[in-house]
Image (cartoon, grey):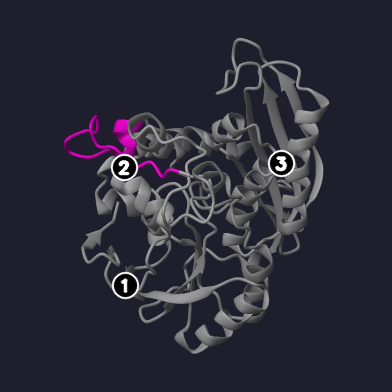
Amino acid sequence: MSQPRPSSATQSPEGWSYAKAGLDVQKMRETQNSMFIQLRETWNYRKGKRGEPFGDLGHYASTISLGNGKALAVHTDNVGTKVLIAQMLGKYDTIGIDCVAYNVNDVICLGAEPAAFLDYLVFEKQPSKTLLNEIMKGLIRGAELGQVAIVGGETAVYPGVITGATVGKGFDFSGSCIGLVDTDSIITGSKLKAGDCIIGLESSGIHASGFTLARKVLLEEAKLPLSATLGGLQKSLGEELLTPTKIYVREVMDMVRSLRIHALAHITGGAYGKLSRFFPYFNGGFHISHLPKPPKIFTLIQESGQISEREMYSTYNMGVGMCVALPRSEVDQAISIAKNHGAKAFEVGEVTGKREIILESPNGPKLELTR
């Protein structure tokens, strides 16, 4: 079978970015911060009552008190435009894994154990039983991997509001997760200190972030067919893009129970810049210096869109889906725990005493990702 090569004929001279593809992360962050100010006012409605929120908005999950030292961690997330790839391929049995993953992986970042999940599916038109059953396969598999019970949700049909890549089969997919945690065990990053080691847990690929940019440069600009078999990829391009997000619940919760975990970072949209979420909790920063060579899919995206190194490491996980910060003396134990759960872990950097995020990419450039 022939192997199409990426074309640069219609690419932006300066190279593509997430903002040029249609999503400006910085402007979105400013919008969110504006929303947080308004949303914080609603906390007064539960002040002094069971279920009172505490902590702050903008971390990986939010927390509400149940009293007696117990709390719930809650989070809502979606699959994004990865659903369009599922629609293009007519393959729907894995997208539910992504939906569960993006929720449970954020909840465990606070040290909370995922317990319950609710899904929200909205369709362009009444779905066939076959389509719905295929989506449910992934959702149920995700629940198994994340060790959560699906306790409810909502299914809706909104013609005129929802469209998709395949006429009549458009849908959007999101969910919410509830986790359990003791208030004195919540991981915020407040225990981080210079000298802590950072280990990375290997990703399964692109996961479900940056698809707007990936689709733009691979499918629209380079005009690569999803059926393409490209050198370095173990699957067709479509199958590679649709590979389910890795769920880290079992290995991370095992680490949380047995080690002194100081911070957990799910590397999703915003990628390594998300380490800045810990800045409000400690006076220090991060030096990511030993990342592995990124999988071929990321190289393909970068070359197809002439994307800068900084943009790639600000958008994609580049092979590491979760970062774990802990005392250096416990690194070997953490790596062993990951291995016992069939996950690959490796040292990627350390916590520093300076408020900045410095990343050295395997290709050489030293990047400043502080935001």
Secondary structure of the residue carrying tag 1 is loop
In the image, farthest residue toward the left: 13
> How far across and down, in percent of the image, does residue 199 sit?
47, 74
Residue matched to label 3? 93
Say few, some or many: other residues with alpha carbon within 10 Å of mark 2 (under 14 / 14 to 19 / 20 or more). Answer: many
Quadrant in the rendering for residue 370: bottom left
Q: Is residue 228 left or right of residue 251?
A: left
> How far across and down, in percent of the image, does residue 357 sit?
30, 63
Q: Residue at x 41, y 45 (%)?
A: 3
Query: Of circles 3 and 1, which is in front?
Result: 3
Q: In the figure, 334 relative to 13: above or below?
A: below
Q: Residue at x 55, y 73 (%)?
A: 344
Residue matched to label 2? 304
In the image, farthest residue toward the top: 160
Q: Amino acid at mark 1?
A: Ser
Secondary structure of the residue carrying tag 3 is loop
Q: Separation of disc 2 and disc 3 at Cα? A: 28 Å
Q: In the figure, 115 relative to 8: above or below?
A: below
Say whether disc 2 or disc 3 marks the residue closer to the N-terminus: 3
> How far across and down, in percent of the image, does residue 197 sit?
42, 79
Contact (Cβ within 8 Å) of mark 3 with mark 1:
no
Query: Of circles 1 and 2, which is in front?
Result: 2
Q: Residue at x 35, y 36 (%)?
A: 217
In the image, farthest residue toward the bottom: 329
Point out the stretch of residues depicted in magenta. 2-21
